[in-house]
Amino acid sequence: MASLSSSRLYRRIERGIVPVLLLAGWEAFSRSGILPAALLPAPSQVLIAWADWIFSTDGNTQTYSGHWLFDIAASSGRVFAGFGIATVLGVAIGMAIGWSRAIESLVEPTLQTLRPIPPVSWIPLAIIWFGIANKPAIFLVFMGSFFPVLLSTIHGVKTCDRNLLRAGAMTGGTPKMLLRHIVFPAALPSIFSGLRIAIGSAWMLTVTAEMVAVKSGVGYVLWDSYYFLRYDIVIASMVSIGLLGYVSDWAIKQAAARMLRWQRGSTLQAREG
């Protein structure tokens, strides 16, 4: 038990070595005077500005003081709206394409034509169609999240063990039952991989949209603080986005771990056999 606790403590220390070294080096370089402090704020300065953005400690962050939770909530709402729509449609359409060759032949040319288009290139049309509000950001997140989920779902369906499908059909399983009880569970590992890729894209595209087409959220604060030469808030915005993306990815990993317990058990049995 003691050795297990020591091992966990060692892993935590090991993970913290690189961030601590980076922060120490950054602090030392910022204080060296090689660059003006205004152009490269030290971590300590960023932390003070970030604290004011969150808690309104001194009011020095202009209009952002005390608004961090509101900005985070605005960005998160756009991320999860677009990501949620992309997940539902990506999984549903991916299951249909992976299962039916007729549907694949029908829609694949269109999807493969749309897929290489960079999501940010939809910004002008999104503004024309939806105006300056939440909808352009949600649309952009959807376009960036949809294809990772779609392709991962198709891959998961197509790589489903055919022996399982034959066994299910021999026991009287209908196509609907096979999809629900065999194909979908077998595709879940691949689907979750697509979700992890999609959530990263969702955060990046939300920030991009907020910098151009929305007047609220973390991306808007980042761009607005750049114009006011508040690079400490710019960096605090970047760190906030990184932390939000990390937490979102962690949540998907935890959901996958809970839903895929059967996979770990079957893998262990296969190894023991």
Image (spheres, rainbow, N blue to C red):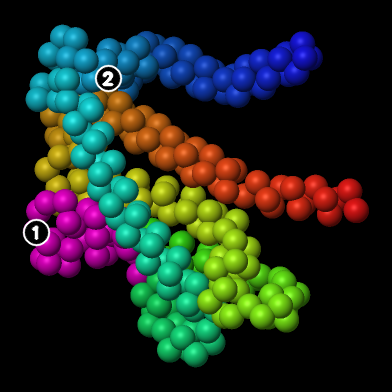
Of pointers 1 and 2, the one earlier in the residue sequence: 2
Q: Identify the image quadrant of the N terminus.
A: top right
Residue hosting label 2: 50
177 is within the stretch colored magenta:
no
Residue at image x 40%, y 77%? Answer: 111
Please tell me in which quadrant of the rendered image residue 82 appears: bottom left
In this view, the residue in front, 33 or 237, is 237
Q: Which residues are magenta?
A: 117-144
Residue at image x 17%, y 67%? Answer: 125
- The three-letter amino acid code for the residue at tag 1 is Gly
In this view, the residue in front, 24 or 133, is 133
Q: Is residue 210 left or right of residue 267?
A: left
**Can residue 208 be seen here?**
no
142 is within the stretch colored magenta:
yes
Disc number at residue 131?
Answer: 1
Give above or below for 77 relative to 109: above
- Name the residue furthest front: 172
For marks 1 and 2, give the CA distance: 31 Å
